[in-house]
Image (cartoon, rainbow, N blue to C red):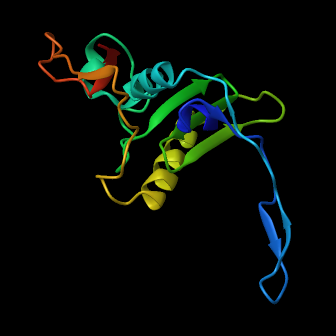
Amino acid sequence: YNTFASGGIYYPPKLIDEVKDSYNHVLYKTNSPSTKILNPTNTAILNYLLQSPFDKSLASFSSPSLINYQTNARFSAKTGTTDSSSWVVGYNPQYTICVYVGTDDNEALKDKTTSKSIFQEIANSLCPKIDSPFFDIPKNCEELSLTNKTNSLKTLTYLRKK
């Protein structure tokens, strides 16, 4: 999901970025070259599509899984639930947040929404402002919104190629 958040550029995971001594001299610095592995336009469209778990206008014909867990800032997200686990990965240009709640022995969860509540709380504490930046719109894309005829709600803004 970090690759989606960075517009299709993969950065190898690293535990330590930099080590400095007490004189502020750099003793170690990670050299992690990035690699473009996804098409930036398609990645931008995907990032906008993955807002749909929050989109209230979709509730009449799908089940937006984060509709009751709105965040202050815009996030793209993917959720998953089984009888014994629940998870949310949400990301925007500033943060990638992953919350997993599950049992070690496949015992059924009593509350399958815990990961969503935790995600919402973390997202809102990291991004208290509603107007946080979202993903840039590529020059070969345009914004698009629809209106749901059933509930008359306008969708969030999505992207399509021009």
Q: Position of residue 87 (x, y in %)?
A: 61, 34
Question: How many numbered markers are drawn?
Answer: 0
The quadrant of the image that shows the N terminus is top right
Q: Residue furthest bottom?
A: 23
**Toward the viewer: 69 or 72?**
72
For image coordinates 29% across by 18% down, the residue present is 58
For image coordinates 62% across by 34% down, the residue present is 9
Dividing the picture into quadrants, the one containing residue 17 is bottom right
Image-based side of 57 in relation to 52, left or right: left
For image coordinates 27% across by 27% down, the residue present is 157
Dividing the picture into quadrants, the one containing residue 10 is top right
Query: Is 162 rendered above or below residue 110?
Result: above
Query: Is 3 rendered above or below residue 117?
Result: above
**Toward the viewer: 104 or 161?**
161
Image-based side of 14 in relation to 75, left or right: right
Q: Position of residue 67 (x, y in %)?
A: 36, 32
Q: Position of residue 4 (x, y in %)?
A: 56, 31
